[in-house]
């Protein structure tokens, strides 16, 4: 492979802002695996955000990209999987599997798509120093008439359209809106774009915590919600505390600390079979590797209000939640899935269909 922009490339990133800024190009924020595609004739590599290749996990995309992309190019985009008109991140994570046979089976059962939104090189020309408007024009020309599973991401410079996308597209599993300055050059691993994500709040039971990697202070709080049977299900964690606050939380939560998990709603967390019928912390995952998943059990008597962007399959927080405040006025039993707001469904095909 010999291209004007060679792997590995770390993608350009976005920083969070509270509202959609004016005077920019706007795109939907896709909830998938960020990937940079390098194609030089028959050679194709899918680079991840960390620079490690994703190629072996998406054989069906390698074939599709070879049939649909220009002969020599570098394209930035997102690998996604859709089920019933919605993005399905769980199906995507299943692909990161060591067994090639399993990957092939999943490729047939839940094929992936690639949504292209930037062009870094074409032919012998690097476009890293070209303004975004030029890169977008060249990308649209290069992908004119492209067919699924490769898509050109919809883009607009109309802020009102971007606002409507922000409201509607969440129902298809998208994260929000990304705003890109029109004259922006492509700069690896720099947060020069802007993202506006959905945020909601929920009152959750704090049922444990994990230590921080630096020592005996709180790393994250383990959150739970009661299902319709009254069972406490683990739905995620909240973190992002200052170091001072992490130390304070150890003392603050000490009266609730249990000597062991015996009698705790998540006492069976070390039993892999228990994870099949309940949501418990420490679930086996190929992502966790050898990471220490142990946690400190707390009597599930305290309630915290946390902010979250959206739920994954209605069962857990897709990303780490943000602590907002304690809720001493809320009984733990009242913290149920019923409080969660569900976005109005929106068919993903309607979004991708406008990309050409």
Image: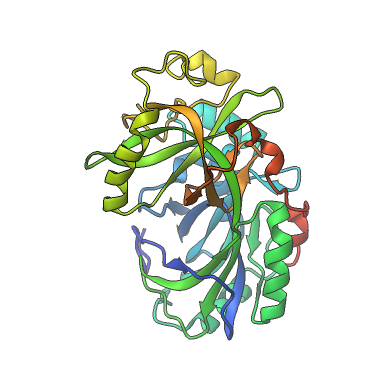
Residue 217 image offset from top left, x and y in percent: 27, 40
Residue at figure coordinates x 56%, y 32% from the top left: 104
Residue at the limit of the structure toward the front, as seen here: 329
Q: In this view, does 201 lie above or below 252?
A: below
Q: Is residue 168 above or below residue 317?
A: below
**Camera-nearest residue between 35 and 310:** 310
Residue at the limit of the structure toward the left, as seen here: 215
Asked if one can make out residue 112 in the rendered structure from this viewpoint, the answer is no
Whether residue 83 sits left or right of residue 141 in the image: it is right
Asked if one can make out residue 266 in the rendered structure from this viewpoint, the answer is yes
**Camera-nearest residue between 298 and 196:** 298
Whether residue 208 sits left or right of residue 141 in the image: it is left
| The N terminus: image quadrant | bottom left
Residue at figure coordinates x 35%, y 26% from the top left: 294
Q: Determine which quarter of the picture holds residue 146.
A: bottom right
- Total marks drawn? 0
| The C terminus: image quadrant | bottom right
Residue 233 image offset from top left, x and y in percent: 58, 28
Q: How is the image coloured?
A: rainbow
Residue at figure coordinates x 37%, y 22% from the top left: 258
Residue at figure coordinates x 54%, y 70% from the top left: 18
Residue 238 image offset from top left, x and y in percent: 45, 45
Residue 309 image offset from top left, x and y in percent: 58, 53
**Camera-nearest residue between 187 and 55:** 187
**Camera-nearest residue between 286 and 126:** 286
């Amino acid at each position: 492979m010999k291209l004007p922009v060679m792997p590995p490339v770390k993608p350009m990133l976005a920083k969070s802002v509270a509202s959609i800024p004016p005077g920019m190009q706007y795109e939907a924020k896709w909830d998938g695996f960020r990937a940079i595609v390098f194609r030089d004739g028959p050679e194709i590599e899918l680079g991840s955000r960390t620079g490690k290749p994703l190629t072996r996990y998406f054989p069906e995309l390698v074939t599709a990209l070879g049939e649909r992309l220009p002969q020599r190019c570098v394209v930035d985009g997102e690998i996604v999987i859709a089920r019933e008109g919605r993005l399905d991140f769980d199906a995507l994570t299943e692909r990161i599997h060591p067994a090639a046979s399993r990957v092939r089976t999943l490729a047939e059962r839940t094929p992936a798509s690639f949504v292209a939104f930037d062009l870094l090189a074409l032919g012998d020309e690097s476009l890293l120093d070209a303004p975004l408007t030029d890169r977008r024009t060249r990308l649209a020309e290069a992908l004119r008439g492209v067919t699924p599973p490769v898509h050109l991401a919809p883009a607009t410079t109309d802020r009102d359209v971007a606002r409507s996308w922000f409201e509607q597209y969440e129902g298809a599993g998208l994260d929000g809106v990304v705003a890109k300055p029109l004259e922006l050059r492509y700069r690896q691993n720099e947060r020069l774009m802007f993202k506006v994500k959905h945020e909601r709040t929920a009152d959750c039971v704090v049922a444990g915590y994990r230590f921080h990697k630096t020592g005996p202070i709180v790393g994250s709080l383990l959150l739970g919600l009661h299902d319709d049977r009254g069972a406490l299900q683990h739905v995620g964690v909240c973190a992002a505390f200052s170091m001072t606050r992490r130390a304070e939380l150890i003392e603050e939560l000490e009266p609730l600390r249990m000597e062991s998990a015996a009698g705790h709603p998540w006492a069976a967390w070390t039993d892999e079979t228990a994870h099949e019928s309940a949501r418990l912390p420490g679930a086996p995952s190929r992502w966790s590797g050898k990471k220490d998943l142990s946690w400190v059990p707390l009597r599930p008597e305290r309630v915290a209000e946390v902010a979250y962007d959206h739920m994954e399959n209605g069962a857990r927080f897709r990303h780490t939640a943000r602590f907002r405040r304690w809720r001493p006025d809320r009984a733990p039993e009242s913290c149920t899935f019923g409080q969660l707001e569900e976005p109005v469904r929106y068919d993903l095909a309607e979004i991708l269909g406008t990309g050409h």
